[in-house]
Image: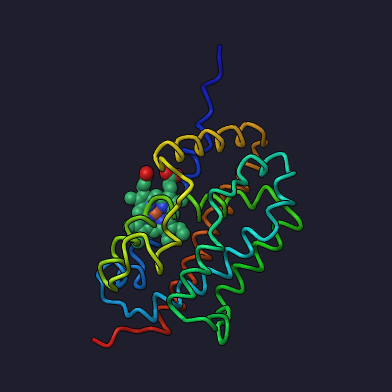
Amino acid sequence: MTSPEPTPFSVVLRTASAAEHEAAESSSFMGHLLNGRLGVEAYAELSGQLWFVYRALEGRAAELAEHPVIGPFIDPALFRTAALEADLLHLRGADWQAGLTASPATAAYVARLEQLIDTWPAGYLAHHYTRYLGDLSGGQIIRGIAEKTWGFEKKGPGVHFYVFEQVENPAAFKRDYRSRLDAAGEALDEVERRRVTDETKKAFALNGAIFSDLDLRYPLSA
Ligand code: HEM
């Protein structure tokens, strides 16, 4: 008797995090952003918080590129730090770094990323997947809304973060990314697959905490 084919890891991650995705999408902060009701200063602050996150995600890419599981995912075409810096220059001016601090939620996310890179690089995959596949998907919806709500030039300063200049065909890129996820899943044992799956849910929760924090700092005035 042949054993049934295991579920591809890309499907495992998507299915396991579906409820968390739904929660992120329908969070109060994202809801206000999607409704076009958020002030541009809240959007600028989101970009600032993301800068801390992406610095941690990308700052040690050279080290991670050597890792057998993570290496195939490290791709400069995805890097967002420089795009965020260009956006922040537009949104906050030349001294954009002055007064920009990581919120407690952002600091906790950064600390988790650092900890994973130091102690369990395979767990980093959960965050790579959650952020970049999200940016290539829902991020495109957010870009359109940001352009419309605050009048940013289409794909211009303010929304560079959401524009992947070096990814010509996002749908094809995502297909290829999912096959890399499937291969990574085959290289991991059952326990590790389970741990990465749990870490993916945690990644959504850490992102959700950043939104909750922003929601408190930028309440809508009815
Ligand atoms: C405004 C809120 C959001 C909207 C409208 C949205 C929308 C979408 C859509 C339409 C897809 C499917 C795209 C496709 O299959 O090609 C998707 C996928 C995804 N989104 Fe979101 N999203 C939002 C927020 C988020 C957030 C906050 C995160 C994480 C931080 C996230 C992470 C992901 C991931 C990882 C996928 C890929 C799922 C998979 O196919 O494996 N999304 N999103």
Q: Please say whether residue 148 is visible from this viewpoint.
A: yes
Residue 215 screen position, x and y as percent: 40, 78
Which of these two is toward me, 208 or 43? 43
Identify the image quadrant of residue 23.
Answer: bottom left
Q: Quadrant of the image for the C terminus?
A: bottom left
Which of these two is toward me, 149 or 16? 149
Image position of 195 with respect to 216: above or below: above
* Residue at (46, 70) in percent of width and height: 87
Residue 25 screen position, x and y as percent: 36, 61
The tally of labels here is: 0
* Residue at (43, 84) in percent of width and height: 217
* Residue at (62, 65) in percent of width and height: 55
Residue 210 screen position, x and y as percent: 49, 72
Residue 174 screen position, x and y as percent: 45, 40
Q: Is residue 199 left or right of residue 33?
A: right
Identify the image quadrant of residue 156.
Answer: bottom left
Q: Quadrant of the image for the N terminus?
A: top right
Q: Is residue 31 left or right of residue 55?
A: left
Q: Please say whether residue 19 is visible from this viewpoint.
A: no
Residue located farthest toward the top when viewing the structure as drawn: 1
